[in-house]
Image: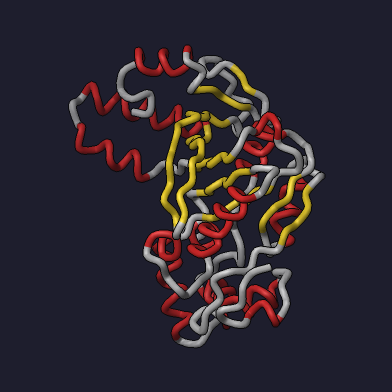
Amino acid sequence: MFTYLDPNVRRWLIEEGKLIRINSDGRASNPNASNEKDTDAISLLGPIALPLECGQNEHKVDWYAAVRHTRLDRIQALADSLLIHQKQEKFAELAASMAVNSVLVHGDRDNWQNPLIRIHSSCHTGDVFGSMRCECGPQFVSALDRIASDPAGGMIIYMSGHEGRGIGLWAKAATYLLQDAGENTYEANRSLGLPDDSRDFRDAATLLKYFHGDRPFRLLTNNPKKIQDLNEFGLSHVTRVKHVVGVNETNREYLSAKQDWGHSFDNDDLVPGRKPE
């Protein structure tokens, strides 16, 4: 399916340099080569010119779609079988089961010097619906604005499989009901028998290695654990930049729970309407 049903299209994408594979060290390799041992290899599609209207501003970025190569191979085999049996109605199920991450690049990455980076976990309720129970939507918009205005350039890595700190949208809905009954966001996860945070930043680290290598960059985050995870995956030159935005009366307790869990911001940051630094 994700060779776009026609091998000729896939071949054209490879010839044009629009479809590559990057290994876990962030190095480009032959997308046709078979290397089952590198289960962390990523297939990368792009760049794709993507003008954005986000908040009050317009942005011009290059978009890359990224997916684990092993997952892509499995989906492709299923798609080939569905084509043979003419079961086109099943293709939507394949697409729904596949986590595709995105990279939004601003500026000329070959000339980046200590760029500004945001690794943004997908949040359907915040990013799409504009939910005020979290700060995710405003964080995404603010990150895009900050990166666009930064002379060093940068990028957003949008992690599609990170909904609800990795538990998925269905479980997240259940935690919201538990929160409405009096639990905080972490207690609600535990009531469901789920980890406080089950997100995997391995793919984000691989993409960072490809786009920037192990060179200094600034990361928009309030979560020290995110930097620790990147350090464990071989990225050692990370400077944290506080990213508190979107505070309101509805999400103050949620943010306070994150602060207690270890997120790095001050009580003064939790004043609704306060402008970010």
Image coords of residue 157 (percent x, y): 57, 45
Image coords of residue 196 (percent x, y): 61, 67
Image coords of residue 270 (percent x, y): 63, 80
Q: Quarter of the image containing the N terminus?
A: top left
Given residues 144 and 72, the one toward you in this image is 144
Residue found at x 59% / y 74%: 186
**Can you say whether 189 is above or below 96 in the image?**
below
Find the residue positioned furthest to the bottom.
Answer: 182
Given residues 37 and 250, the one toward you in this image is 250
Residue found at x 54% / y 71%: 246
Name the side, left or right, on which 138 lies relative to 210.
Answer: left
Given residues 67 and 267, the one toward you in this image is 267
Q: How is the image coloured?
A: secondary structure
**Can you say whether 275 is above or below 207 in the image?**
below
Residue found at x 61% / y 73%: 275
Disc count in the image?
0
Image coords of residue 252 (percent x, y): 57, 81
Location of residue 224 by image quarter? bottom right
Name the side, left or right, on which 174 lies relative to 144.
Answer: left
Q: Quarter of the image containing the C terminus?
A: bottom right
**Can you say whether 206 is above or below 133 in the image?**
above
Residue found at x 44% / y 65%: 126
**Can you say whether 252 is above or below 155 in the image?**
below
Given residues 20 and 248, the one toward you in this image is 248
